[in-house]
Image (tube, helix red, strand yellow):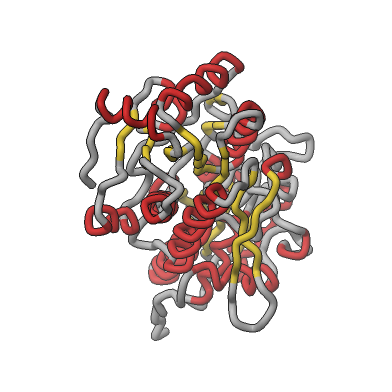
């Protein structure tokens, strides 16, 4: 993508013209955050209410350093690569902003003639969005949230852009792994899934059965307190009945008192660097059951994989970006674009606006109806809810045995 630094001449023009728009990315990237960026830029370019379109390079920290690029005149030919580019094409951050940083933004908005602020991110970014909005209410600056998180833990919205692609990665990759383990049935394999305190991405592994009949055998979510003895009983039963199998576990597993089953390496704000949960669970099998076990931790490979990008996810991400711009130029502010599933057998979804106060730092977790009674698997209700978000059927993997 071609881009250039905002020149002094352009900055001076921005002060005079006004009506400019800026978009900032926050938090961990996804496979479709650039699709939302594409939607914001293209909708803003087409709007007579928007003069110049700027992106902050490196999130809020980049904005505070005045590291901006003017993308107003980029053509669709130059921009459409965003739709198939992983992670954040403009950079993102996990900056922990305090009062001085928020106050420092106000004169910068004025300096660059910013009337529309688009904050694209997850829980932490929506909290930042709300705090910026609170300071802009008395000014003619409209602030909108564009949802993004593979964790799928944003409140109010049916699901979050970024989740569908992560879910497709988990379902497809775990299906391939199950195929491997069936082909050489000599061990238990434990797969660790991202998702922090919510089990949505972990649960998506259950859809591996759409691709390969012998899907994951056990799934453990952070919505249920982890019981080591129950886990070992489950695995021992699996070994006795089948002799091998695949376990999927969330990085956020914890005991009944809230203590993580593996001590986190360190935590900065909301960003926790979890210990190696899959290795711990595999070691338990080897040490306490005397059976061969190994661990797999896809980690970042599954967060922004274009190879597994969901077409549905990409289209919805773009539309969320476009909807945020339309709402802002229509006079809305202090809102996040959210997705609402429409009734009917065929999957359809529409956007609506949620008050940012409803979203700020509120985690949405898996409902009980999506988790089996034993707490070691997923219900068909979840599969039916999640399946349309994968953006089409998974490849069918054969087994001739």
Residue 73 location in percent, x, y? 26, 47
Q: Quadrant of residue 340?
A: bottom right
Q: Quadrant of residue 376?
A: bottom right
Residue 215 location in percent, x, y? 53, 70
Residue at point 46%, 33% (across, down): 114
Quick check: can you spot residue 380? yes
Q: Which of the pair 153/300 is nearer the observer?
A: 153
> Residue at the front extreme?
16
* Vertical arrangement, residue 157 with respect to residue 12, above or below: below
Q: Which of the pair 391/132 is nearer the observer?
A: 132
Q: Quadrant of residue 400?
A: bottom left
Quick check: can you spot residue 149? no
Residue at point 23%, 47% (across, down): 1
Give the total of numbered labels. 0
> Residue at the top extreme?
100
* Vertical arrangement, residue 295 with respect to residue 68, above or below: below
Q: Is residue 3 left or right of residue 30?
A: left
Q: Is residue 332 left or right of residue 396?
A: right
Residue 273 location in percent, x, y? 52, 32
Residue at point 64%, 70% (across, down): 385
Residue 256 location in percent, x, y? 78, 40
- Assign the C terminus to one quadrant of the image: bottom left
Residue at point 59%, 76% (across, down): 347
Q: Is residue 145 left or right of residue 225?
A: left
């Amino acid at each position: 993508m071609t881009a250039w630094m905002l020149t002094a001449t352009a900055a001076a023009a921005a002060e005079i013209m006004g009506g400019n728009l800026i978009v900032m990315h926050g938090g961990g990237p996804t496979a479709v955050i650039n699709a939302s960026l594409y939607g914001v830029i293209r909708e803003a370019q087409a709007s007579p209410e928007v003069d110049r379109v700027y992106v902050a390079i490196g999130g809020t920290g980049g904005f505070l350093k005045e590291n901006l690029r003017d993308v107003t005149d980029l053509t669709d030919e130059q921009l459409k690569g965003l739709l198939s580019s992983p992670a954040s094409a403009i950079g993102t951050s996990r900056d922990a902003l305090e009062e001085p940083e928020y106050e420092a933004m106000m004169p910068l908005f004025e300096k660059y003639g910013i009337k529309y602020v688009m904050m694209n991110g997850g829980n932490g970014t929506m909290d930042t969005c709300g705090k910026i909005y609170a300071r802009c209410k008395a000014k003619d600056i409209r602030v909108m949230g564009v949802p993004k998180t593979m964790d799928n833990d944003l409140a109010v919205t049916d699901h979050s852009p970024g989740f569908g692609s992560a879910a497709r990665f988990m379902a497809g990759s775990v299906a391939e792994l199950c195929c491997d383990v069936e082909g050489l049935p000599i061990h238990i394999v434990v797969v660790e899934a991202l998702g922090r305190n919510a089990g949505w991405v972990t649960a998506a592994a259950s859809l591996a059965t759409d691709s390969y009949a012998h899907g994951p055998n056990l799934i453990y979510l952070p919505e249920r307190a982890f019981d080591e003895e129950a886990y070992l009983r489950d695995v021992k039963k699996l070994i006795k009945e089948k002799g091998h199998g695949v376990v999927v576990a969330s990085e956020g597993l914890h005991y009944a008192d809230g203590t993580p089953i593996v001590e986190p390496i360190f935590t900065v704000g909301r960003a926790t660097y979890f210990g190696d949960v899959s290795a711990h669970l595999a070691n338990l099998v080897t040490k306490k059951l005397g059976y061969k076990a190994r661990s797999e931790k896809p980690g970042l490979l599954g967060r922004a994989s274009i190879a597994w990008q969901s077409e549905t996810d990409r289209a919805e991400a773009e539309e969320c970006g476009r909807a945020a711009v339309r709402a802002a130029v229509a006079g809305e502010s202090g809102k996040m674009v959210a997705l609402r599933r429409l009734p009917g057998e065929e999957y359809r979804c529409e956007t609506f606006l949620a008050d940012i106060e409803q979203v700020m730092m509120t985690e949405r977790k898996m409902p009980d109806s999506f988790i089996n009674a034993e707490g070691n698997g997923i219900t068909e209700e979840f599969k039916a809810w999640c399946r349309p978000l994968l953006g089409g059927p998974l490849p069918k993997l054969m087994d001739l045995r």
